[in-house]
Image: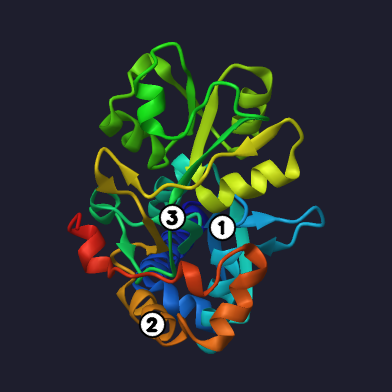
Amino acid sequence: MRRTVLKGMLALGALALSLGTAATTAQAQDALERAKESGYIRVGFANEAPYGFATPDGKLTGEAPEVAKAILAKMGIEEVDGVLTEFGSLIPGLKAGRFDIIAAGMFINPKRCEQVQFSEPSYGIGQAFLVAEGNPKGITDYGTVAGNGDLKLAVMAGAVEKGYAEKAGVAEGQLVILPDQSSLVSAVKAGRADAAALTALSIARMADNNEGVESTEPFGEVAGESVKGHGGFAFRPEDKALYEEFNKNLKEFIGSDEHVALVTPFGFGKGYLPNKSTEELCAGE
């Protein structure tokens, strides 16, 4: 009996050692090797049209996912699975290994550069506000909101607009922080917010798809500084091989006829090509 128990204990020990070795091997294998071996990769997105969103039938699309699919196909990775995540949870989700790339049109800025490795930008774009139809309160930009303490401005959790508002002098109590685009639209339509801030393309699409609201004219400065945002793809810093191969192909792709034709249906195109590098953006330039 003792011999049988001992054999069982030895077998369990060997199994544990085997599992531990397998886990170590999996950790040592980088994301690029895994993706090429399996033929697929997971990307995080935030359901923010036109940057990255799911169609009613569940297809992952938008500027960032479509560019990512094109680049990954050039790398021999044909299947891309989307993982829907609230915008503010994209970086934590990437770091936790829920997906290997953020494909959500995320703006590149110094704070985010401290946490993730960004590709070169795939686009550059300014800001706009969603307001009630007819813009009855005459809201044009962050300065309008800062100058009237009775106004409420809705911003998306984890997005750059909260920082822009603070820079312009908008008081904390004037901000309504919400998780996604649909919440921003609902807040403006219900009067819980007088305006909602996002990039000009997102606001234009929200206005087109909802009654009773409209977009302000796009603007590119806040408190005298440029707020033309540049979006890119984010990677874990340790996934160096994946980042380098993706970025190499991306730099060759951006601005090509193939690229412009791919993103034009989402409102992007030659007028939205980037004019700054990731190095400049990470340095706050």
Q: Position of residue 136 (x, y in %)?
A: 60, 22
Rendered position, 174 above or below 91: above
- Residue tagged by mark 1? 51
Classify mark 2: helix, strand or loop. Answer: helix
Q: Which circle's residue, 1 or 3, is located before the other in the chain?
A: 1
Rendered position, 228 above or below 38: above
- Residue tagged by mark 2? 251
Assign the C terminus to one quadrant of the image.
bottom left
Comparing 70 with 166, the one in front is 166
- Within 10 Å of the Cα at label 2, are there few (<14), some (14-19), or many (20+) other Cα atoms? some
Q: CA distance from mark 1 to mark 2?
A: 19 Å
What residue type is disc 3 on?
A: Met
- Residue tagged by mark 3? 106
Q: Position of residue 137 (x, y in %)?
A: 54, 21
Task: Please give the name of the residue rendered at 77% of the width and 34% of the height, measured from the top-left corner.
Answer: 211
Q: Is residue 39 something one can see in this rendering? A: no
Rendered position, 253 above or below 238: below
